[in-house]
Image: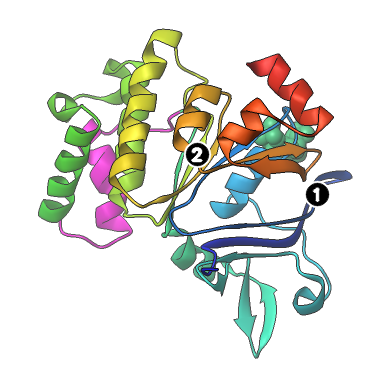
Amino acid sequence: MQNPIIEFDRVDKSFGDLKVLDELSFRVDPGERVTLIGPSGSGKTTILRLLMTLETVTPKADPAADGGVVWVEGEPYSHMEKKGRLVPANEKWLRKRRSRVGMVFQQFNLFPNMKVLRNVTEAQVHVAGRSKEEAEQKARDLLDLVGLAEKTDEYPARLSGGQQQRVAIARALAMDPDILLLDEVTSALDPELVADVLAVLRDVAETTSITMLCVTHEMGFARDVSDRVMMFDSGRIVEQGPPEAMFSEPQEARTQDFLRAVL
Ligand code: ADP
């Protein structure tokens, strides 16, 4: 068995009294494509947000014994090692570690005051420390990959939602992440724009070895692209397996009900 690129070890996450993740454990192999499905509120987005360090785990008294730790690439991620002990990560640690992870959001989140090219170069220059020339070359290559070579000089507001989302994909890939997180990336789009975005992501899946974690209601996409589908309910994994098995012969009643409602 190879070492996992992502490991959740008995992770808890609560918002006030609401327990969103409940002793959640799972592993993802390098290069694996995993789709997270399940009813709204089951904790899927929280998992991506933890990996993006937009949320922190609920700490446990003794992480070495009790878990509650997210690991990425064999190193603690939600925590850091201090004098041989695991303690909650500080901002400096998180900043360094999260550069390995890219995320595409439902609402694109492009910088509205920057042209398309600069949206894709900004973090390359200011976070990765690349030269402007290198960053622009990379941005142009990626914008070409997502079919937007012609749009480098436009402001985001002049693009369709599908085009904006493709810029967001290029922007995430520009930082050469090892892990790409996709959070309902087509759900804010008009139906006729969904196919282009999914085609770009299929391309990314086929031409790179990037590890992908994807929350989606696009079951066709999940079936085509994923190696594994994980069904969540109430912050726990109800059932998981390869898409063929999950979609054609789900074993658990909750998975069957969920799939009946969305398929
Ligand atoms: P899913 O992606 O499966 O729909 P989420 O991970 O977004 O589920 O949310 C799980 C639960 O956590 C929901 O009940 C949601 O309302 C709640 N939640 C998410 N973020 C916050 C927050 N920042 N503050 C309070 N509650 C939150």
Q: Residue at x 70, y 31 (%)?
A: 38
| Residue type at tag 1 | Ser
Image quarter hosting the N terminus: bottom right
Return the x and y of residue 225 as percentages of the image width and height: 45, 36
Considering the numbered disc 2 on the image, is that residue within a helix, a strand or a loop? loop
Which numbered circle lies on residue 226?
2
The span from disc 1 to disc 2 (Cα, nearest Å) is: 29 Å
| Residue type at tag 2 | Ser
Return the x and y of residue 232 as percentages of the image width and height: 73, 38
Q: Earlier in the sequence, mark 1 or mark 2?
A: 1
In the figure, 229 relative to 102: above or below?
Answer: above
Q: Nearer the viewer, mark 1 or mark 2?
A: 2
- Which of the 4 quarters of the picture holds residue 158? top left
In the figure, 28 relative to 136: above or below?
Answer: below
Give whichever of 238, 56 is nearer the camera: 238
Q: Is residue 1 magenta?
A: no
- Which of the 4 quarters of the picture holds residue 191? top left
- Left/right of residue 79 with respect to residue 141 in the rendered view: right
Give whichever of 118, 57 is nearer the camera: 57
- Left/right of residue 218 with respect to residue 145 in the rendered view: right
Q: Label 1 belongs to which residue?
A: 14
Q: Which residues are magenta?
A: 108-131
Which numbered circle lies on residue 105?
none
